[in-house]
Image (spheres, rainbow, N blue to C red):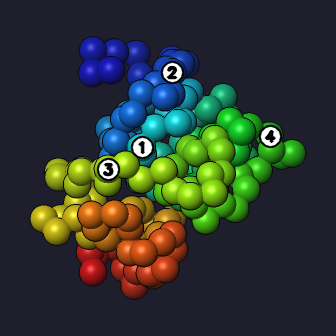
């Protein structure tokens, strides 16, 4: 995407189901009218700055915020994101990645994601707060899961615990 000069033109990207890991890069914010399908990956963070891009996702970010890009941790949707007023992200405690398209009885944890060094979120011990809008989803990567479950920690700030 770095070779794209016209950053204000509408751009459609489908990266769904590619086992991509980590946090969406803040640099995607350079695009003004991006529609990106990043669902069904191993995404653990969505910078809140991207949720303010009103023209993203064909204007759905203006209506539904971050949910228009990816359903948050602890939820799912058939599409992995909110497409309409009648299509919200649904609570699912076993959903451990953003953009989940199903609610499994047991979390699908094969390998925890690697820390995203340099992305503004990671630290050496893999403790981080994913974004300002998801500060309650403070996670600490362990060998098996994240802090024993979804949303069992709260951040007081964007500073790693």
Q: Is residue 52 visible?
A: no
CA–CA distance in space, label 1 to label 3:
10 Å
Measured Cα–Cα span from mark 4 to mark 2:
19 Å
Cα separation, mark 2 vs mark 3, equals 24 Å
Q: Which residue is mark 1?
A: 42
Kindly report which numbered mark, 4 or 2, lies closer to the viewer in this rendering. Answer: 2
Q: Residues within 10 Å of mark 2 (few under 14, many from 20)?
A: few
- Picture quarter with the C terminus: bottom left
Label 2, secondary structure: give it. Answer: strand
Left of 65 or right of it: where is 128? left
Q: Which numbered disc, 4 or 1, marks the residue closer to the eye?
A: 1
CA gap, disc 4 and disc 1:
24 Å
- Within 10 Å of the Cα at label 4, are there few (<14), some (14-19), or many (20+) other Cα atoms? few
Helix, strand or loop at mark 3: loop
Position of 40 compared to 110: left or right?
right
The crowding category of the residue bearing disc 3, from other C-alpha atoms within 10 Å (few below 14, some 14 to 19, many at least 20), is: few
Q: Which residue is mark 4?
A: 84
Which quadrant is the N terminus positioned in? top left
**Relative to 43, residue 91 above or below:** below
**Residue shown at the point (24%, 51%) measured from the top left:** 114
The answer to whether residue 146 of the structure is visible from this angle is yes
Residue at 26% across / 75% down in the picture? 160
Which of 101/134 is in front?
101
x and y, in percent, of residue 7 in the image: 41, 22
Q: Residue placed at 65% from the left, 51% from the top?
A: 103
**Where is mark 3, residue-wise?**
111
Marks 1 and 2 sit apart, C-alpha to C-alpha, by 15 Å
């Amino acid at each position: 995407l770095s070779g794209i000069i016209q950053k204000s033109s509408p751009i459609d990207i489908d990266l769904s189901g590619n086992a991509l890991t980590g946090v969406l890069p803040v640099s995607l914010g350079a695009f003004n009218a991006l529609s990106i399908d990043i669902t069904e990956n191993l995404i653990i963070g969505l910078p809140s700055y991207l949720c303010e891009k009103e023209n993203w996702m064909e204007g759905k970010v203006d209506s539904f915020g971050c949910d228009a890009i990816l359903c948050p941790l602890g939820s799912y949707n058939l599409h992995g994101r909110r497409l309409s007023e009648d299509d919200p992200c649904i609570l699912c405690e076993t959903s451990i990645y953003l953009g989940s398209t199903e609610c499994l009885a047991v979390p699908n944890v094969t390998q925890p994601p690697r820390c995203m060094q340099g992305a503004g979120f990671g630290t050496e011990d893999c403790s981080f707060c994913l974004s300002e809008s998801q500060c309650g989803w403070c996670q600490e990567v362990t060998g098996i899961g994240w802090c024993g479950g979804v949303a069992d920690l709260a951040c007081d700030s964007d500073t790693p615990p």
